[in-house]
């Protein structure tokens, strides 16, 4: 049966990088059908809503969405549309690969790791936030649950199993934040015991940051709570050449949304300057998810070969190519 995915073209550079990505996907012959849906500023202008019900229905029905960056206007009723979408579909796993690519300005050439970040609870989604009337004291509460910790650590180990990876590192601060981080670590140990074939390592978050900068090649899969994951996954993106090459997946039991990590880049929108690789790598994650791992691998290899040849690279990678000429160079290697 033909599979349909929801495609959200997004704001700013979104439509350009999506066109480039779909061009490459079509070259792969994935057989996927696209159902276009609006979100963000473009949806507000067209439908009067940032996330129209038709878009939510489309994601619910298709269970898989490829999404370009979205603008969340100030005062639009959301702190972030992305966070709202993650909450709506209970997309508990944020999966961010960081892989070295040739001819980037990164410090390392041998990085291949994945950060698995809990997406639905923890300090990032603090509860009861308030600042006292005199402005002297601020408060926010952090909730960590056994269920939330269990499913994210299990996801990390299942990912290790299905991708042939050998090690999972749980990143925590249980030595100081004994309640919330302590519960996460306890549950991580319990889950790890069910996967004796995969090495389990525990690392305190401050040490993890230092180790990531000094010896990143020691890591394989990192699993951690929401706020630590937010920070660590950007650190990892920086280690491999920045946000232009960083994809992310948000995965839940009922739906999954694949996206570039960077924003809408309004400064270069509409000029053909945007690097489409982050969204293409998100599309590769999506192909793995829809059980087309061979196409995912063909896409990743074509991207690497194009970067190796420095063929039509966009300006952020030091080239003079455009979004579409870069996509054509990648497509020609598929
Ligand atoms: P937003 O408000 O949507 O987060 P932003 O401009 O604040 O947008 P990013 O979109 O992440 O944040 O952009 C940060 C910088 O990186 C900008 O200078 C932008 O031009 C550049 N940039 C981001 N994505 C890309 C890309 N795909 N290709 C080239 N440059 C990019």
Image: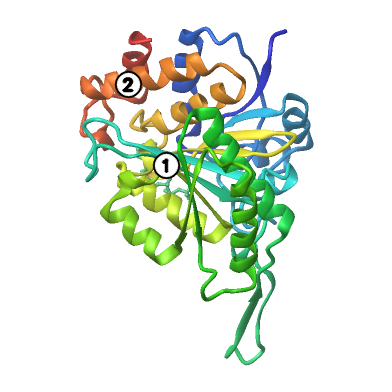
Q: Is residue 100 above or below residue 238?
A: above
Q: Residue at x 38, y 10 (%)?
A: 334
User: On the rendered image, what quadrant is the N terminus found in?
Assistant: top right
Q: Is residue 179 above or below residue 159?
A: below
Residue 68 visible, this angle: no
| Residue 71 location (% of width, % of height) | 55, 46
The one of 201 and 135 positioned closer to us in this rendering = 201
Question: Mark 1 to mark 2: distance in Å?
Answer: 30 Å
**Label disc, if present, on residue 326 of the rendered structure:** 2
Callout 2: SS: helix
Q: Residue at x 36, y 28 (%)?
A: 272
Q: Residue at x 33, y 32 (%)?
A: 273
The reply to whether the residue tagged 1 has its Cβ within 8 angstroms of ligand 1 is no
The one of 7 and 197 positioned closer to us in this rendering = 197
Quarter of the image holding residue 155? top right
- The residue under label 1 is 220
Which color scheme is applied?
rainbow
| Residue 53 location (% of width, % of height) | 78, 37
Residue 237 visible, this angle: yes
Badge 1: residue crowd in 10 Å (few <14, some 14–19, many ≥20): some
The one of 197 and 26 positioned closer to us in this rendering = 197
């Amino acid at each position: 049966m033909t599979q349909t995915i929801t495609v959200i073209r997004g704001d700013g550079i979104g439509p350009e990088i999506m066109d480039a990505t779909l061009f490459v996907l079509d070259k792969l012959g994935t057989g996927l059908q696209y159902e276009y849906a609006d979100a963000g500023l473009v949806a507000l202008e067209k439908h009067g809503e940032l996330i129209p019900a038709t878009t939510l229905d489309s994601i619910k029905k298709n269970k898989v969405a490829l999404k370009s960056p979205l603008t969340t206007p100030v005062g639009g009723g959301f702190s972030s549309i992305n966070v709202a979408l993650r909450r709506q579909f209970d997309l508990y796993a944020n999966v961010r690969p960081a892989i070295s690519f040739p001819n980037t300005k990164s410090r390392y050439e041998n990085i291949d790791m994945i950060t698995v970040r809990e997406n639905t609870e923890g300090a990032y989604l603090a509860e009861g936030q308030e600042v006292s009337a005199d402005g002297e004291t601020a408060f926010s509460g952090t909730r960590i649950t056994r269920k939330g910790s269990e499913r994210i650590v299990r996801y990390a180990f299942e990912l290790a199993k299905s991708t042939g990876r050998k090690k999972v590192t749980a990143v925590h601060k249980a030595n100081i934040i004994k309640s919330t981080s302590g519960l996460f670590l306890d549950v991580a140990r319990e889950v790890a015991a069910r996967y004796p074939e995969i090495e389990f390592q525990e690392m305190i978050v401050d040490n993890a940051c230092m180790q990531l900068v000094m010896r990143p090649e020691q890591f394989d899969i990192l699993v951690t709570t929401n706020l630590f994951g937010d920070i660590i996954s950007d650190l990892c993106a920086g280690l491999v050449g920045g946000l232009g090459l960083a994809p992310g997946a948000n995965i839940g039991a009922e739906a999954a949304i694949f996206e570039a990590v960077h924003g809408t880049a309004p400064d270069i929108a509409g000029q053909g300057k945007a690097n489409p690789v982050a969204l293409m790598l998100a599309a590769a994650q999506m192909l793995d998810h829809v059980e087309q791992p061979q196409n995912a691998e063909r896409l990743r290899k074509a991207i690497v070969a194009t970067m190796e040849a420095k063929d039509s690279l966009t300006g952020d990678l030091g080239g003079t190519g455009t979004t579409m000429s870069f996509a054509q160079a990648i497509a020609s290697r598929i």
